[in-house]
Amino acid sequence: MHLIVGLGNPGKEFEHTRHNAGFDTVSLLAEKHNIRLNKSRCKALTGEGVIAGQKVLLALPQTYMNLSGEAVSPLMSFYKLPLTNLLVVYDDIDLPKGRLRVRPGGSAGTHNGMRSIIYRLGQDAFARVRVGIGKPDNPQMDLKDFVIGHYPREDWKEMFDCFLRAGEAVEEILANGVEKAMSRFNGA
């Protein structure tokens, strides 16, 4: 089984904000593959199914972003999964809006949700799909306000398409591995 985690903040006020790119991607992936995210386990909303011939557990942590590791680590333990079977999808302000970056591992960078997961797991050698949300146009804008803010109306179609592509990247990783997904999705 593979654990596919979308990062975000729970609650109506955070729906479809920039910081919830992981939630939006995994929710679309669940819809596409008829996986119901309707079970609560280990502080996460989960659903089991099959994607690209692989058994998967999709998860949306119901902790706030900065505590995402409190859901991911127990899920990994409960299902006795190796680190190679973890894939995390999350927003990245260091990538231009609408761009994707697939990686086999690495640091958390500036992302507190990833920092929490790496801290709780004690390792960073797991796959991730980073969804570019860009930086604020106004350099004086507080980054927290930017990431928990909603997309301007004119950006929504571009970001929706990006979430669909991020879901395709997850499918590619499951079907053919991280390296193939990197070569297919890390370009312009």
Image: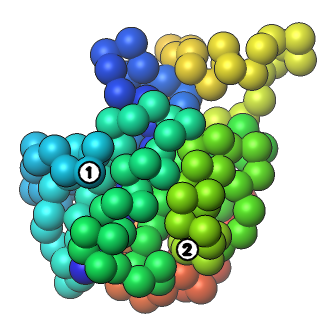
Q: Residue at x 64, y 36 (%)?
A: 133
Q: Is residue 183 left or right of residue 60?
A: right
- Asked whether residue 125 appears in the rendered view, the answer is yes
Viewer-side residue, 99 vs 144:
144
Other residues around mark 2 within 10 Å, as few (<14) / some (14–19) / many (≥20): some
Question: Which residue is identified by label 2?
Answer: 126
Could you say which quadrant of the image residue 48 lies in? Answer: bottom left
Left or right of 37, for residue 155: right
Percent x, y of residue 74: 34, 60
Percent position of residue 169, x then y: 46, 67
Q: Residue at the far right: name it.
A: 139
Q: Residue at x 71, y 69 (%)?
A: 106
Q: Residues within 10 Å of mark 1 (few under 14, many from 20)?
A: many
Q: Give the answer, above or below, for where 104 lies relative to 98.
A: below
Q: Position of residue 93 (x, y in %)?
A: 72, 38
x and y percentages locating residue 28 in the rendered image: 28, 46
SS for tag 2? loop
Q: How is the image coloured?
A: rainbow
Disc number at residue 42?
A: 1
Q: Residue at x 74, y 62 (%)?
A: 107
Residue 78 is drawn in which quadrant? bottom left
Residue type highlighted by circle 1: Cys
* Secondary-structure class at tag 1: loop
